[in-house]
Image: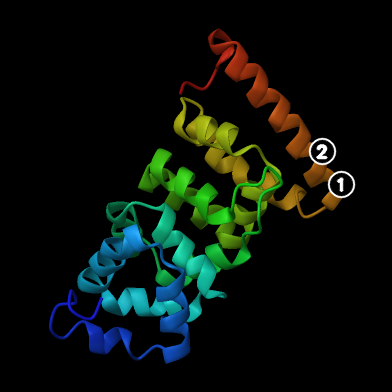
Amino acid sequence: ILNGTLPGKLDILLRCPGERVVDITCAVKHDRVSTMLALVNHAPDKLLDLVTNCPGPEKAAAFVNFVEPEVVIWLLDSASPLCLAQLLGTLQSQSSGATAPAVVAQLVQEVTAEQLLKVLSNVGPHGVARILENTNVDLIIRMWTGSLESLVIFGAAPLSAIQKDCRAAATIKQVTDSIQRCLSSFPQLALCGS
């Protein structure tokens, strides 16, 4: 990393507490070091904000490990690093066993930046986290990218609010899992495109 960093970029990142830099660097997979270098060389100041504000180095490292560098760079350029850090910080492991950063990676790879930013602006990072934790992610992607996107984007706020209740959230998760299984089994039933 030291050898691959452009002049003037590393000093910005080294403003972050040393222990945090070491923890994140150790948690980044060997084959993803080039991704980390791309981020350091592209927007070290924004990466510093993300790394400094992201609770837990494993979540920041997982973001680097699971999301393509172009997508992370685009996110850092398009959204507030503080907002991204809050989103990563609020996510928990999914009940399906997938890690939260992997779910976020799937979301940012399949949903356009404009759609994702609209949802983030409507419900905030905690609301998106609640939706991702309590709703079938494949169904979310299908709906956020389909022909009913406007309805879904505006419906995200009420869905997130309802999911503050644990029982309602668990029920919504079961129902959306069932809907997604049905849509996957019978593609001709897909109303929202995919």
- The outermost residue toward the right is 167
Q: Is residue 34 left or right of residue 7?
A: right
Estimate the x, y position of residue 132 in percent, counting from the top left: 62, 48
Give the amino acid type for the residue marked by disc 2 in the picture.
Thr
Residue 162 in view (yes/no): yes
Q: Marks 2 and 1: in contact by CB < 8 Å?
A: yes
Estimate the x, y position of residue 96 in percent, counting from the top left: 68, 42
Above/below status of 66 relative to 37 = above
Estimate the x, y position of residue 142 in percent, counting from the top left: 52, 30
Q: Please name the residue shown 44% across and 60% down the image.
A: 63
- SS of the residue under disc 2: helix
Mark seen at residue 167: 1
Q: Choose between 45 and 3: the one closer to the eye.
A: 3
Q: Please name the residue shown 41% across and 58% down the image.
A: 65
Give the amino acid type for the residue marked by disc 1 in the picture.
Arg
Q: Choose between 8 and 179: the one closer to the eye.
A: 8
Q: Which residue is mark 2?
A: 171
Label 1 and label 2: CA atoms lie apart by 6 Å
Above/below status of 183 relative to 55 = above
Q: Please name the residue shown 58% across and 19% down the image.
A: 184
- The outermost residue toward the front is 30
Q: Is residue 25 left or right of residue 172?
A: left
